[in-house]
């Protein structure tokens, strides 16, 4: 073996050792979608994109006949959070929901939802409600053709919710119910979980926030750590603090950094709380849907 090859191999070893050392020093054991992709040896495979077609066929035959379509989004999330936050959180959330349900497959997460791009805050690429409706209808019909008997639509981004999702779900459920196939819109994972978490934060003295605030930043910290959140910027993560719907002080300059509220008290512990709430609320609602089809 040449000296050059030996040097390269040693270099790779040093980089790998440094990466392991950094991960150990951080003390972070929070799950991430990258770590979870394809599942672990002690967990069933539930991600459609990580399965082969024979594995999908076997899963369907074994009773995993519920398809979970979760939408994410590509959107600026303040200076501290990566633009793909909705999609990254969505992948972790829908996988956890599928595992907890036990009879479902998590379909690939859609990375675009209704929004508008901005040159001032260049992190957003969005769809229109019309395009989202067409996409949801198409992928639902495809899942039904694949053999799924129940399809659940849900999302991590507010655009299109609830009207587009609910309308598509009702239209397709009306179409296929005669064949014992059903389509549902699960809104608890977004609206109810977020509303209840916001109330908990307020009741416990946390500042109000919405977009790129404490809920978003905390969940991304829990799931992705420093890969998803620029933690050095959290101490200055304050944006527009005027409550939604309240009159703005004309003498107060607007803070246009993408944050709505104050995210400085974001923590991974709070992130775990909202993540668990989203998963638990979704599972409970979906189980209720499926119970009515029996």
Image (cartoon, rainbow, N blue to C red):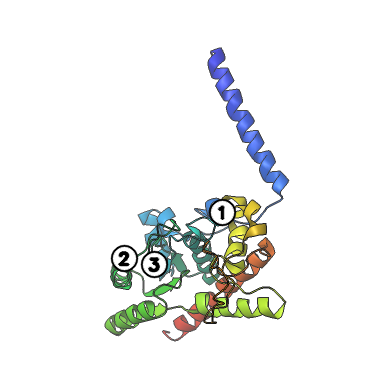
| Spatial separation of the CA atoms under disc 1 and disc 2 | 34 Å
Q: Nearer the viewer, mark 3 or mark 2?
A: 3
Task: State which tag comes first along the sequence, 3 or 2.
Answer: 3
x%, y% of residue 91? 49, 61
Q: Secondary structure at mark 3?
A: loop
* Residue at image mark 2: 146
Q: Secondary structure at mark 1?
A: helix
Q: Answer whether labels 3 and 1 touch (C-beta < 8 Å).
A: no
**Disc 3 residue crowd, few under 14, some 14–19, many 20+, Cα 10 Å:** some
Pick the residue in front: 114 or 37: 114
Q: Can residue 103 be seen?
A: yes
Residue visible at 67% across and 58% down in the picture: 235
x%, y% of residue 203? 70, 81
Rendered position, 78 above or below 133: above
Q: Is residue 212 left or right of residue 28?
A: left
Q: Can residue 45 be seen?
A: no
Pick the residue in front: 134 or 64: 134
* Residue at image mark 3: 115
Label of residue 176 in the image: none
Task: State which tag comes first along the sequence, 1 or 2.
Answer: 2
x%, y% of residue 187? 47, 79
* Residue at image mark 1: 228
Q: Is residue 120 left or right of residue 253?
A: left
Q: Quadrant of residue 206?
A: bottom right
**Disc 1 residue crowd, few under 14, some 14–19, many 20+, Cα 10 Å:** many
Q: Quadrant of residue 172?
A: bottom left
Quarter the N terminus occupies: top right
């Amino acid at each position: 073996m040449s000296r050059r090859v030996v040097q390269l191999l040693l270099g790779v070893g040093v980089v790998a050792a440094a990466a392991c050392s950094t991960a150990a020093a951080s003390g972070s054991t929070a799950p991430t979608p990258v770590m979870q992709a394809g599942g672990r040896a002690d967990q069933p495979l539930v991600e459609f994109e990580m399965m082969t077609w024979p594995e999908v066929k076997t899963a369907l035959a074994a009773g995993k006949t519920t398809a979970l379509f979760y939408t994410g989004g590509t959107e600026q999330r303040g200076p501290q959070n990566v633009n793909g936050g909705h999609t990254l959180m969505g992948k972790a959330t829908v996988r956890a929901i599928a595992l907890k349900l036990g009879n479902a497959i998590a379909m690939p997460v859609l990375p675009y939802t209704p929004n508008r791009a901005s040159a001032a805050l260049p992190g957003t690429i969005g769809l229109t409600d019309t395009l989202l409706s067409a996409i949801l209808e198409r992928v639902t019909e495809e899942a039904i053709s694949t053999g799924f008997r129940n399809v659940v639509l849900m999302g991590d981004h507010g655009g299109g919710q609830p009207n587009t999702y609910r309308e598509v779900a009702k239209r397709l459920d009306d179409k296929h119910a005669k064949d014992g196939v059903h389509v549902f819109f699960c809104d608890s994972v977004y609206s109810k979980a977020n509303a209840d978490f916001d109330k908990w934060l307020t009741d416990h003295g946390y500042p109000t926030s919405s977009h790129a605030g404490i809920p978003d930043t905390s969940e991304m910290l829990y799931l992705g750590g420093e890969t998803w959140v620029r933690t050095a910027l959290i101490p200055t993560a304050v944006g527009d603090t005027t409550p939604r719907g309240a009159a703005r002080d004309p003498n107060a300059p607007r803070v246009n950094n993408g944050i709505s509220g104050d995210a400085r008290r974001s923590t991974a512990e709070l992130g775990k709380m909202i993540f668990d709430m989203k998963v638990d609320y979704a599972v409970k609602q979906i189980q209720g849907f499926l119970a009515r089809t029996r």
